[in-house]
Image (tube, rainbow, N blue to C red):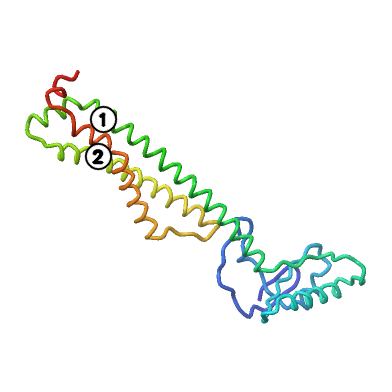
Amino acid sequence: YVKIGSHKFRVVGVLKKQGKFMGMFSLDNQAVLPFGTFQRLFSRRGWMNVRVKVNTDNYDEAKEEIYGVMRQIRGLKPMEKDDFAINQSATMEAQYKAIKLAIGGTGLFITALSLIVGGIGIMNIMFVSVKERTKEIGVRKALGATQSMILGQFLMEAVLICLIAGLVGMGLAGGLSLLINQFFPSSMPVGLAIGSIIISVVIGIVSGLVPSYQAARLDPIDALRYE
């Protein structure tokens, strides 16, 4: 048995855990009881939410019938306005999908912008690295290092920088996902994690290609003379 207010009810089943709705209230501390019983015991309280499950494809007809029943329950005369509202789950679902799509689009734009800015930042870092290590490049070339070896070295460094940054970002995103999961059921798919690593590698290659090519093209004599 469970006690709600001053009334005692017999428990006939337990619903599956659903968590919180949009972080505002929990769906797991609610009780389902016959409408007639609820109306008889709690109808004098101010606000009331009634959930109706319709086993028909003709929602419009069912909605009109529900309107009629609710007006009768509320004691409304034919010309009186409704003092209640009926929301269809399909309408609410469409609104939720629209909001989700807008949030997803905004997130995608911010992600793309961050990748571009990050790529430019990595490119600038590599240009500075090439300039500061010009003499080192000259020494390596004098000892027999080929252009492809110099190119590969600096390209690998750019990829490693982006890969480490990507892994750190994934770690932060995973922690944030655990926090958000307290309010919205969410998870990080394996495919998304793999895709993030691939994107990090691609950004590293694209960002480091020009600086690496510049390093590979340096003349060893000029590089050794660089101060």
Spot occupied by residue 44 in the image (x, y as percentages of width and height): 84, 67
Q: CA distance from mark 2 to mark 1?
A: 10 Å
Mark 2 residue crowding within 10 angstroms, few (<14) / some (14–19) / many (20+): some
**Nearer the observer, 151 or 196:** 151
Quadrant showing the C terminus: top left
Q: Is residue 24 above or below residue 205?
A: below
Q: Position of residue 2 (x, y in %)?
A: 67, 73
Residue type pointed to by label 1: Ser
The residue that appears at 11% across and 28% down in the rendered structure is 139
Above or below residue 34? Residue 164 is above
114 relative to 92 in the view: left or right: left
Task: For the residues labelled 2 and 1, say whether their Cβ atoms are less than 8 Å apart.
Answer: yes
Residue 129, label in figure = 1
Horizontal relation, residue 5 to residue 227: left or right: right
Percent x, y of residue 79 = 92, 68
Residue drawn at x 15%, y 27% is 219
The image shows residue 221, relative to residue 167, as above or below, that is: above
Which quadrant of the view contains residue 160? top left
Report the front residue among 139 and 170: 139
Give the labeled residue for mark 2: 157
The residue at 81%/62% (across/down) is 46
Horizontal side, residue 98 vs residue 62: left or right: left
Residue 68's label in the rendered image is none
Query: Tag 2, which secondary structure?
Result: helix
Residue at the location (70% across, 79% down)? 58
Corner quadrant of residue 221: top left
Q: What is the residue that sits farthest to the left in this orientation? A: 143
- Label 1: element kind: helix
Q: Earlier in the sequence, mark 2 or mark 1?
A: 1
Q: Who is closer to the viewer here, 148 or 87?
A: 148
